[in-house]
Image: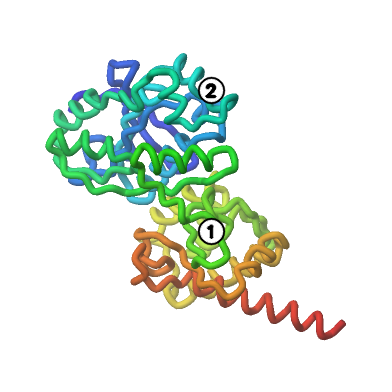
Amino acid sequence: MPFKDYCELPTPHGIFRMYDTGNEMLRVVTFGDINKLDSKPILRLHSSCLASEVFEARDCDCADQLREAMKIMAHNGSGIIFHLHQEGRGQGLSKKIKAVYKMQTEALDTVESFQAMGLEQDIRDYAPALKLLKDMEIKQVRLVSNNPRKRCALEQAGILVEVLNTHPMVRPENADYLQSKNEKLGHSLPLSFMRDNTSPILFYHSDQTWGEFSNFSQHAVYLHNKIWRTTEHFYQAQKFNNPVLQERVRSAASPMLAKQIAKKLEEQNLKYNWNNVKEYIMSKALSAKFTQHPELESLLLSTQQLPIAEHTSNDSYWGDAGDGTGLNRLGALLVQLRSQLRANNESQLCAE
């Protein structure tokens, strides 16, 4: 292993590790022990973006992609991030600032701005990360990216690549930028996930389109005389009869941590009849969430008769397995709740 020294990073997605690479231009962050990665690890080659990652600028998707990669790794139990210090597609922070200013003042897109300055579109160098992958004897990866250049760099280094697309958080500030990345830089951002009035309602991450339907969305519920930060906190805690264990889950700082804590406790403490009652528990949590937050009830009713699915390859019971073959029980419960809410509203109108 190229390096051993590390510190833990307690994040909303779980405990990550940051390793000392001896190179200030390259940071290596893993979920789990770097010596115990999967034979086909989840990989994020990520170039730094000071504006979005530190100052929360909303006109790109860099920080969004990093967070999504971390969520995927936490869900799967392992993964590795190479965070490379190369701003502005490798041109550096100074030129990036000038290019963004041109975009803002001359109505240019990101490609046109680089062209106006006489810059190559993408000169990022992945060699340091590729060398480490070779030293670690990693021969295949699951790459979290929409950028074909990253896939090509890995393949040219003899590494087999399976691409895991990220799903952009489209905002007024970044919509044009994302579109230009697809059209002019060859990226494969799934921009069809934007809301419209005809497509099925597909959701997964709470900070993306239709994310309000996710159990991870930051909407507290009041149940069993307690406030639960999210429906995920409530659902995971109900796996146990022991109130001490329930409170450990309820006190988790994030829904991901609540899920991870419950997972560790399940082997010795899971309710004997959990599989028989889990849909009832989920339905109870959803009902509380959408009735205690009127804006969420309105959002759910606004979907009219459209199908709803938790769109993820990570779950074939609550989700659609990513290809429609899953049971999609969470989507089914939301559709059922939508019918109940609509019937209740109609009854109230009739009574008036």
Quadrant where the image shows the C terminus: bottom right
Residue at which label 1 appears: 215
Quadrant where the image shows the N terminus: top left
Q: Quadrant of residue 266?
A: bottom left
Front residue (pair 225, 76) = 76
Does the rendering let one see residue 16?
A: yes
Q: Secondary structure at mark 1?
A: loop
- Residue 293 placement, left or right of 275: right
Amino acid type indicated by mark 2: Lys
Whether pointer 2 and pointer 1 mark residues with C-beta atoms closer than 8 Å, the reply is no
- Compare marks 2 and 1 and give the one earlier in the sequence: 2
- How crowded is the residue under tag 1: few (<14 C-alpha within 10 Å), some, or many (20+)? many
Q: Nearer the viewer, mark 2 or mark 1?
A: 2
Q: Quadrant of residue 351?
A: bottom right
Front residue (pair 318, 309) = 309
Q: Residue at x 43, y 40 (%)?
A: 65
Q: x%, y% of residue 233?
A: 54, 56
Q: Secondary structure at mark 2?
A: helix
Q: x%, y% of residue 175?
A: 53, 43
Q: Residue at x 20, y 46 (%)?
A: 40
Q: x%, y% of residue 103?
A: 53, 27
Residue at which label 2 appears: 102
- Residue 229 placement, left or right of 154: right
Amino acid type indicated by mark 1: Asn
Q: Does 216 sit above or below residue 3?
A: below
